[in-house]
Amino acid sequence: MSKAMLIDQTKCIGCSACTVACKNIYDHTPFGVLRTSMQKYEQGSYPNTSFRFRKVMCMHCQNGAPCIDPCPVDAISYKDGEDGGIVLIDDDACVGCGLCVRVCPFGAPKMDDDRRKADKCTFCEDQLVPGEPPYCSDACPVGAITFGEQEAVIAAGEARVSQLKNAGRNQASLYGTEDAIVYYVLDAPATIYDLPKEGYTLASLGWKTITSPVGSLVALAAMGSMGLTRLRNRMEEVEKEENK
């Protein structure tokens, strides 16, 4: 994958312009189902409080996205070709079991209960063909979202981290380069932003065992009774549609 995104959370003001721009374009989902959203984190106690923000979206994990293998109908995969590396959900194949929602360490996929489908950020894949950036990148009023060639994006992130450290923000770091194509510039430990430790990808989570009997039991437990019922009902519907 030659493209990547850098989200500088040290610049982010939590305005949610990225969320509004995304929802305006991808408005097929009901209210509350967002492909990107803003999470606020409060630290300290009154009157000495501070806020940090995190743009929540699909990180398009590399080296084995945690959501791919657990999908019981193989509806999630990497995009092939020049723009390969983007993690996509096949809307037609998705049966709405919700397992991807449960296993994603970033809370990226959301359930569209109206359509009984999972939905998430697609990196605005149609924008990449003509060489345009994702809509959220253009919408940010403070320039906190950078999109471009992967090497240049990483270099920009590293330069920003150095700048922050030189200014005395010693906890500054670049998050995501080990596992994803979406990176964060942070000025506090990743745990404060509800981010998993780097190296969270499929192999480390052990989800490759899902194809084994034991792995299947783990998957079923993760889905829960509601997820199993939804999966069974939807698969019955799909079978009826195919028979017609």
Image: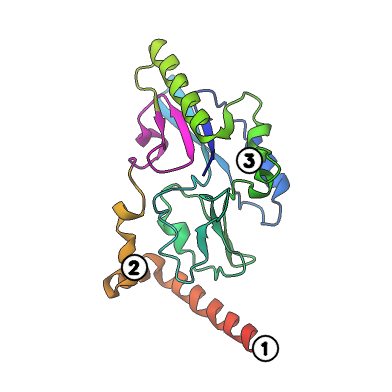
Name the residue that disc number 1 marks.
244
Observer-nearest of 186 and 132:
132
Label 1, residues with CA under 10 Å away: few <14, some 14-19, many ≥20: few
Amino acid type, mark 2: Ile
Which of the image's four quarters has the C terminus? bottom right
Q: Please report whichever mark, 2 or 1, sits nearer to the chain's N-terminal start.
A: 2
Asked if residue 43 is among those painted magenta in the image, a careful observer would answer no
Name the residue that disc number 3 marks.
19
Q: Position of residue 175 (x, y in %)?
A: 41, 33
- Please, which residue is most extreme toward the left here? 214
- Please, which residue is most extreme toward the top here? 167
Residue range corresponding to the magenta coloring? 174-198
Task: Locate residue 28: give its quadrant.
Answer: bottom right
Label 2, residues with CA under 10 Å away: few <14, some 14-19, many ≥20: some
- Please, which residue is most extreme toward the bottom here? 243
Labelled pair 1, 3 in contact (Cβ < 8 Å): no
Residue 8 visible? The answer is no
Name the residue that disc number 2 marks.
210
| Count of marks, rendered view | 3
Q: Nearer the viewer, mark 1 or mark 3?
A: 1
